[in-house]
Image (tube, helix red, strand yellow):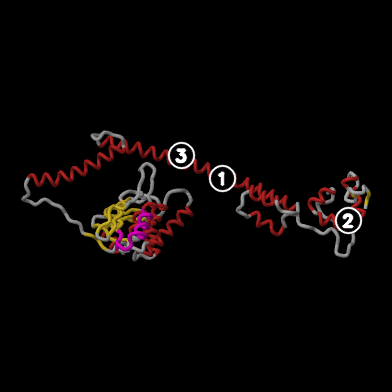
Amino acid sequence: MNTKITNISNGTATILLYKHIGDIDGMGMGVNGAWVAEDIQMLNEFYKEEITAINIRINSIGGSVQEGLSIVSAILNSEIPCNTYIDGMAYSMAGVIAICGQKKYMADYGTFMMHNANGGDNEEVLMLITNSLAKLFERNTNLTLDKCKDLMNKETWMTADECKMLGIVDEVIETKKVKPAMNASVRELYAVYNKVITKTQIKMNKLTDLLKLSNEASEEAIIEAVTAKDAKIAELEASIESATAELNALKEANDAAEQEVKAELIENAVKEGKIDVATKEIYLTSNKSNAELKDLIGKLKPAYTPIFDNKGNAPQAVAGRENWTFNDWSKNDPKGLAEMKENDSVSFENLIKGLPSNLSPNYNPATDKKF
């Protein structure tokens, strides 16, 4: 199982969200929302009697709304209480996840950021997503919906104390400050500062590895590499935007052509008497493909239209049937053909003139005589 559970101890399960949410281009695989949701569901199904709480620990810059909402849904629907801990950063979608805990905690050095949804060109869709996220903030904090939208629109950054004041978190956790004593020995001082230096060096090595530089690369070289990568990203984004616009234009043209074919298909069906004029709008707005509609219409029989009135008077003009042959009547309106034979023998005789005698409807193959 692709689990994000780090441990289960003393009745508590812990899940770490210590990377960006989802798979962001250029950043590698981040937190998979589906996997986290599966873990929470699994804990609810198989460990409900053993576990009293699930702790979601967060240190993330945010990321995919889709992946994040999978985690949000799992937290809100969990029968086992899910508590959230902001262990550093909770930005964007990571912040949305953080406010959904039953109990919400934040380290005193932590930072929080909320903003509108972004990415893509469809402003209507982005606003719809923003309003949805604002609703989550309203329901899980002390903020009103209007205040949530205002803070998101301004892209608001907050400290732990500010989050506590606004009811975004329930409690700020005070961290221990590790300081060397004034009378500490050289060895003790070395241990404290070496720990800080080592951590910094590890972080720099990760950065140079990501940029494919030597671990001894200068600050200027790192800045140059980052600038080049940013330029490449901007170039790729421009290419993607151009390709997306081209695809959208092609899709619109294809949709228009498909609609034109559909309209022609339905008009022909109306002329053939297979579709009533009053109902053709239903077919025009149908979500069926043209191939499906063609197959459906092909199976329809033309509606029967009486060619004589109920008193047996002269035939009524039926548009589109003036040039029908005997075969046309037989195939498309056999009832009308029978009515013609019964009530208008002259028209019927004219219709069968020219037919071979053995194909005439008056021919008896047993006696070779007309009947």
Q: Residue 251, labelled with which disc?
A: 1
Q: Nearer the viewer, residue 286 or 150?
A: 286
Spatial separation of the CA atoms under disc 3 and disc 2: 71 Å
Quarter holding residue 306:
bottom right
- Tell whether 170 sits left or right of 183: right
Q: Is residue 323 visible?
A: no
* Whole-percent x, y for residue 153 in the image: 39, 56
Look at label 2 and name its amino acid: Lys
Q: Residue 239, labelled with which disc?
A: 3
Spatial separation of the CA atoms under disc 1 and disc 3: 18 Å
Query: Disc 3 or disc 2, which is closer to the eye?
Result: 2
* Whole-percent x, y for residue 57 in the image: 29, 55
Furthest residue toward front:
366
Look at label 3 and name its amino acid: Ser
Look at label 1 and name its amino acid: Lys
Mark 2: secondary structure = helix
Disc nearer the start of the sequence (1/2): 1
Disc nearer the start of the sequence (3/2): 3
